[in-house]
């Protein structure tokens, strides 16, 4: 009997070890699968699958083990997703992946606690929104790359952004994955024991809800405007390209400016010959004039000559010197008659890319710290600019990932969204298609056409339904004119602003606090300690 009992115990221990190993593999696989959900792969169904793998990995674990699994998941996801940051600066750029993974560590520590609550898939989904809300803001203003929402530009869940923005879309993606795990665990439990009818009813309800999520998304999609019946204007996009790849882009400033001027002059010649439509405005990309045209008369004269030739204002991207030793990243409306006018200054310069926080410390970590020799100052005003008789909402490069910055442009009357960007320093990497996916999300979220103008690719025109209507190649010169719709209405997401994110975040934090409190009370009760009674009002 003792031998038989020992064999049973050994079998149980061996089974537990195998399950533990499978959970660690699930954490690793979940991170890798999530990479494939994002461009350039774009296999969007893998985003909820990834959430399911991670939820299963941490299920029943201690907070410490969940945190370690979060590190595995986070590194497996962010290291390949952000490998474009290392294109020219080397492995030191992977420190960003480590920093981003640290937020998944916190998520991994929280999920095992939350999963003890009834209805835990909802609270798990809120926890994902909470993690992203924190990561989007900290440190140094945050880095919102890799949000679950940004994996869905072509998925059936995309229309949820019109209701609650990117945070709600993240919630729905995470909820879908968490519900799938809940079903798996519930069915497994039913198979092990004779479960009451209520369990079968709960499973049936969960299956119906899980199947209903994409159906709701498709129904919302029928209300998404494609812009076909809206007022339309012709817009020209100029991608002048750069002479060569690499971080020496700054040394090519004059050549890059000439490329965009020459491309615009060629467009003007085609217009005069009747081979192209005269646009309402021309859009140049970020860094199209890294020579300050407000201080350098030659640069200003070149831009003016291009604007006069094409006969319409140009939105240029320029680096402005000052104040002092600082610089500013600007979008400037350049009129053919009056020259520079309305200006937007980039509100969220990229830390370690456009300014160097903790520069003295950074120099001790890497010799490349001074590749950013001058710190860029942030602007304060939204990017709503009047040009060619319409109001555009200008965001510069990575700002397209910032919910609040894009939302501000809409609330200030933007009829068309413009993303000025410079992808030259990232080579033939995944950065451009990942950024394009974010622009598609913004188009649907705000029901606006979006024009993306890049120095070297990908430039594109996106309809309000998120469809890419026209696009350029990478590291090719391209000029195209296209008709875009103008919108003035607001989606529910526009009206609610950040409220959905704050509500979901509050629920995520509250569920964690509740789970911890219940856990402590249960532990105290099992130890035979008195459980503190809730405070009552003293009698008068």
Image: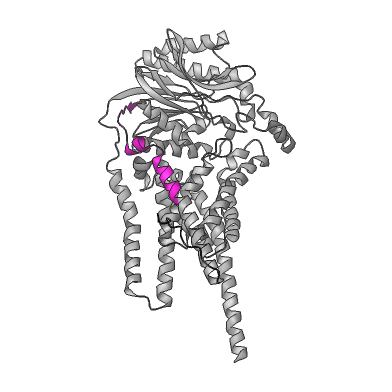
- Residue 413 location (% of width, % of height): 35, 25
Q: Front-most of 494 and 286?
A: 494
- In the rendered structure, does residue 435 fall within the stretch colored magenta? no
Q: Front-most of 46 and 259?
A: 46
Looking at the rendering, in which quadrant would you find the N terminus?
bottom right
Determine which quarter of the picture holds residue 484: top left
132 shown above or below 357: below
- Residue 264 location (% of width, % of height): 46, 17
- Residue 530 location (% of width, % of height): 53, 68
- Residue 124 location (% of width, % of height): 46, 55
Q: Front-most of 232 and 363?
A: 363
Q: Front-most of 415 and 434?
A: 415
Q: How is the image coloured?
A: one colour
Q: Is residue 5 left or right of residue 388?
A: right
In this view, which residue lies farthest toward the front? Answer: 540
The residue drawn where x is 40% and y is 57% is 539
Q: Is residue 64 left or right of residue 191?
A: right
The residue drawn where x is 39% and y is 18% is 387
Looking at the rendering, in which quadrant would you find the C terminus?
bottom left
Residue 234 in sight:
yes
In this view, which residue lies farthest toward the bottom? Answer: 1
Residue 153 in sight:
no
- In the rendered structure, does residue 505 fall within the stretch colored magenta? yes
23 shown above or below 464: below
Q: Which residues are magenta?
A: 483-507
Q: How many marks?
A: 0
208 shown above or below 485: below
Determine which quarter of the picture holds residue 467: top left
């Amino acid at each position: 009997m003792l031998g038989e009992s020992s064999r049973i115990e050994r079998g149980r221990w061996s089974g537990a070890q195998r399950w533990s190993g499978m959970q660690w593999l699930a954490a690793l696989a979940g991170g890798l699968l999530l990479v494939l959900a994002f461009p350039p792969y774009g296999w969007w169904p893998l985003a909820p699958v990834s959430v399911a793998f991670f939820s299963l990995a941490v299920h029943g674990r201690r907070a410490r083990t969940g945190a370690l699994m979060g590190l595995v998941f986070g590194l497996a996801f962010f290291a390949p997703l952000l490998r474009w940051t290392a294109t020219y600066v080397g492995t030191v750029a992977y420190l960003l992946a480590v920093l981003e993974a640290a937020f998944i560590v916190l998520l991994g520590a929280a999920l095992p606690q939350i999963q003890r609550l009834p209805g835990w898939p909802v609270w798990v989904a809120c926890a994902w929104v909470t993690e992203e809300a924190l990561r989007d803001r900290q440190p140094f203003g945050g880095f919102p790359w890799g949000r679950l929402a940004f994996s869905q530009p072509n998925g059936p869940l995309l229309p949820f952004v019109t209701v609650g923005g990117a945070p709600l879309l993240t919630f729905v993606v995470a909820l879908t994955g968490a519900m799938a795990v809940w079903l798996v665990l519930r069915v497994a439990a039913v198979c092990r024991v004779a479960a009451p009818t209520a369990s079968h009813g709960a499973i049936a309800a969960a299956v119906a809800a899980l199947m209903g999520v994409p159906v709701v998304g498709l129904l919302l999609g029928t209300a998404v405007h494609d812009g076909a019946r809206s007022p339309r204007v012709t817009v020209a996009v100029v991608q002048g390209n750069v002479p060569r790849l690499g971080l020496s882009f700054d040394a090519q400033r004059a050549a890059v400016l000439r490329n965009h001027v020459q491309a615009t002059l060629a467009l003007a010649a085609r217009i005069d010959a009747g081979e192209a439509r005269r646009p309402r405005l021309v859009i140049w990309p970020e860094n199209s004039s890294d020579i300050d045209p407000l201080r350098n008369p030659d640069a200003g004269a070149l831009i003016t000559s291009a604007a006069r030739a094409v006969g319409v204002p140009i939105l240029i991207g320029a680096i402005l010197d000052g104040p002092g030793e600082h610089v500013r990243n600007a979008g400037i409306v350049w009129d053919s008659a009056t020259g520079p006018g309305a200006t937007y200054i980039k509100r969220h310069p990229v830390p370690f890319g456009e300014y160097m926080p903790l520069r003295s410390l950074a120099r001790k970590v890497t010799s490349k710290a001074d590749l950013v020799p001058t710190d860029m100052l942030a602007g304060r005003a939204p990017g709503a600019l009047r040009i060619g008789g319409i109001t555009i909402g200008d965001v510069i490069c990575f700002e397209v990932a910032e919910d609040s910055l894009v939302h501000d442009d809409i609330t200030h009357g933007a009829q068309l969204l413009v993303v000025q960007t410079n992808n030259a320093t990232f080579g033939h990497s995944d950065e451009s298609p990942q950024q394009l996916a974010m622009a598609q999300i913004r188009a649907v979220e705000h029901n606006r056409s979006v024009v993306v103008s890049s120095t070297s690719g990908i430039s594109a025109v996106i309809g309000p339904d998120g469809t890419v209507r026209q696009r350029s190649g990478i590291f090719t010169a391209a000029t195209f004119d296209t008709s875009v719709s103008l919108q003035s209405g607001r989606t529910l997401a526009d009206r609610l602003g950040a409220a959905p994110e704050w509500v979901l975040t509050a629920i995520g934090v509250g569920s964690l606090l509740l789970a911890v409190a219940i856990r402590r009370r249960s532990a105290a009760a099992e130890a035979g300690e008195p459980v503190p009674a809730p405070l009552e009002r003293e009698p008068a």
